[in-house]
Amino acid sequence: MASQNARALTAKNTRGRLRQDRFAPYFFISPFFILFTIFFLLPSLFAIGISFYKWKALGVPEFFGTRNFERLLTGDPIFWQAVKNTIFYAVASLFIVAPLALLEALALNSKRLKFRTFWRAVYFAPIVTSTAAIAIVFRMLYNREFGFLNELIMALGGMPVDWLGNRGVVRFSVMGVVLWRWTGLLAIYFLAGLQSIPDELYEAAAIDGATQRQRFFHITLPSLRPVMLFVAVIVSIGSIQIFDDPQILTQGGPANASLSVVQYLYTRGISDLLYGYASAVGVFLFVVIFTLSMVQLRLFRGGER
Amino acid sequence: MKKWLYVLVLVLFGSFMAQAQEEVTLSAWTHDNLYVEFFNSRLSEWEALHPDIKFTYDFQIIPNAWDRYLEALAAGETLPDLLGLEQGGFPKFMKDGIIEKYFVPLDDLVASDRSDYAEGRMSIYSYNGKLYGLESSLTASVYYYQPKIFEDNGVAVPTTWEEMLATGEELGKKGIALNVATNSGNWFQMWLDQRGGAVFDADGNFVFADEANRAMAIEVADLIQKGVKNGTFLVVLGDDHWGGVTIPTAYREGRLAGQVMPDWWSSCCLMPGVEEMAGQWKVALPPVWSGGGAKTLVWGGTGWAVSQGEHQDLAKEFIGFMYLGKESQVQKFEKINMFPWMLSAYNDPRITDLEDPFYGGQKLGEIYAQLADGVPVWYQSPFRSNWSTAVGDNLPLLFDGSMTPEAFVDEVTRITQDAIDFGF
């Protein structure tokens, strides 16, 4: 009887443990999902819902149907100006900043480079520099009347450029800041990828008589494919959501020539308190980023096959 | 023994008195510590008026405080008793009936001597015919200039905008600008108001496109465009106009002679920007329009509103005590350098006789005394920010000549009307 009880108790404990074991993983991952639900999922669903309303934070939201979206897509030239600017930032980031970061990573990974740690720290420094300091320094550099860049251009016999006031130039000026700020971080990602490529591959290729160029295109680049996918996704999402670089430099001006979509969302939502309309901009942004990420994922996966 | 008994009686009496005092905490939010400094400087006077109340003060400095009020309301929180409110933030409260639901009308505070206060400083805090904010400063503009530049070049300080344009053309050839042009809706509006034009009427209707206002707006835009083109105005865009290096460097290098700006600009921006140039500056009456209009231009201003709540009567009395009446207006000038918007305060020698060393000992009060009754009257609207943004967005196109003055005014009208029609 005693042994029967003991067996029953053991079985009960085992069942309890099994149940515990079954729920333990969920318990451990639950903090993330609780926070994710509170701070991302619910606000996102709320934003999607409110995008069909006219709401100015106070008072009762008024159902607006698809009018916010209709206006956004067909009757809001400032929004489309912001879209054009954002596409420019995204394309430039993807095809200029990312490749430059790869070149930088190759240089930092070179065994012939002396003081490698120092150089890596130097390239990483912009990431930890305060936004306010960046704003002050770059505004001084770009200043039309007294800026260092124009002083240099004039010393070389050129005409001064209105870096922040000329609508045709201002986006390039913003990209200058983007380039300075983010190349170092992307280079760190590439560097991590480069360091994970086994030396044996290069040694074998060298024995087979592959040139450096062939090694780069046939070993380095294919091996970096996962990192490149990661960087491409990060850069695309980051540049579509670009906000602080144009904000600190130009506040989106002149005449919205450097305004990004997120700046526009911020203006409509926070400054004008048009929560419904700003949410419609947010939903648009979400759809674009989601679609783009899926396309990128597919493209790279297709390449892997 | 008897001595101890007295002490005991005194202590008991003291504690009884302390208990008899009502305890009140007055809270205030503002974006600028200057106002807190002023309030603190007069607290003992205020408390002496209320011996039956034991006050505690909760004064908070909060950037863009007016946006925080809206967030507090949206979150169901209570507002502070006193709300510092920059005039540009006021229209946000005109939407959805917020003002009437949460703010206290202040008309009775000025009822007895309303005509002694600049109407233009009250219209900007008015809604449906009631006053909801008390202004801090006159905000009248003057011409801050470097006399040496004018003397060296043998030209007189311009008294009209047309003169400024002509003198600017002459000095522009030498690389000297006389004033600054910036891409701000408020900046353009101060010109338009001075000329006599209006954006919204007293009922909040959009009247910018009315025949007379459109003509004046085109006239203003035309002068600005010509001034930029001939070098009278140095174009300084965005934040650079406030905290950048362009303007102070241009002053130091003698490439910018001065700027037409409001009273508060002297202590916030000019003096800290070029401290080492103290004594090299003068103030003149601002240029006027040959075609008519007001004596001066106004830009900015911060008012104080009172929120509905337990202490609304005390809060209202507090701000009335701090801001209204000749003595308060003069003290405000003496302590935080804000020029009175009460006209009779300019009879006080503490204002008119004060010599300012930054301006070579000039008596600035004498200049402002000539302008106080000439402050333009203009009106707010829930759609003012739409108009202001449209102006700011399109001014660079006016500056660089890619838009005619007519096209500029019509585009601003179209954008604003579109926002009104959509219900922004």
Image (cartoon, rainbow, N blue to C red):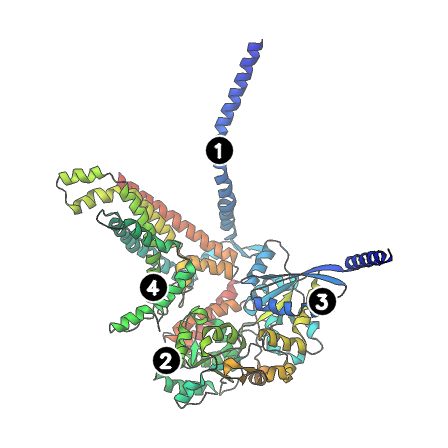
| 3D distance between C-alphas at marks 1 and 2 | 69 Å
What amino acid type is highlighted by mark number 4? Ser
x and y, in percent, of residue B61 in the image: 57, 62
Secondary element under disc 1, as helix, strand or loop, is helix
Q: Are marks 2 and 3 in contact (CB under 8 Å)?
A: no
Per the image, the residue denoted by label 3 is: B47
Q: Left or right: where does residue A288 sit relative to residue A52?
A: left
| 3D distance between C-alphas at marks 3 and 1 | 61 Å
Per the image, the residue denoted by label 4 is: A173
x and y, in percent, of residue A155 in the image: 26, 73
Mark 2 vs mark 3, foreground winner is 3
| 3D distance between C-alphas at marks 1 and 4 | 48 Å
Secondary element under disc 4, as helix, strand or loop, is helix
Q: Which quarter of the figure has residue B228?
A: bottom left
Query: Are the residues under badges 3 and 1 in a single subunit?
Result: no
Per the image, the residue denoted by label 2 is: B229
Work out which quarter of the rendered image holds the C terminus of chain A and state it: top left
Question: Which residue is at a point 29% across and 46% down the rendered structure image?
Answer: A191
Q: Which quarter of the figure has residue B221?
A: bottom left
Secondary element under disc 3, as helix, strand or loop, is helix
Mark 3 vs mark 4, foreground winner is 3
Mark 3 vs mark 1, foreground winner is 3
Is residue B147 in sight in this rendering? yes
Secondary element under disc 2, as helix, strand or loop, is helix
Per the image, the residue denoted by label 1 is: A26
Work out which quarter of the rendered image holds the N terminus of chain A and state it: top right
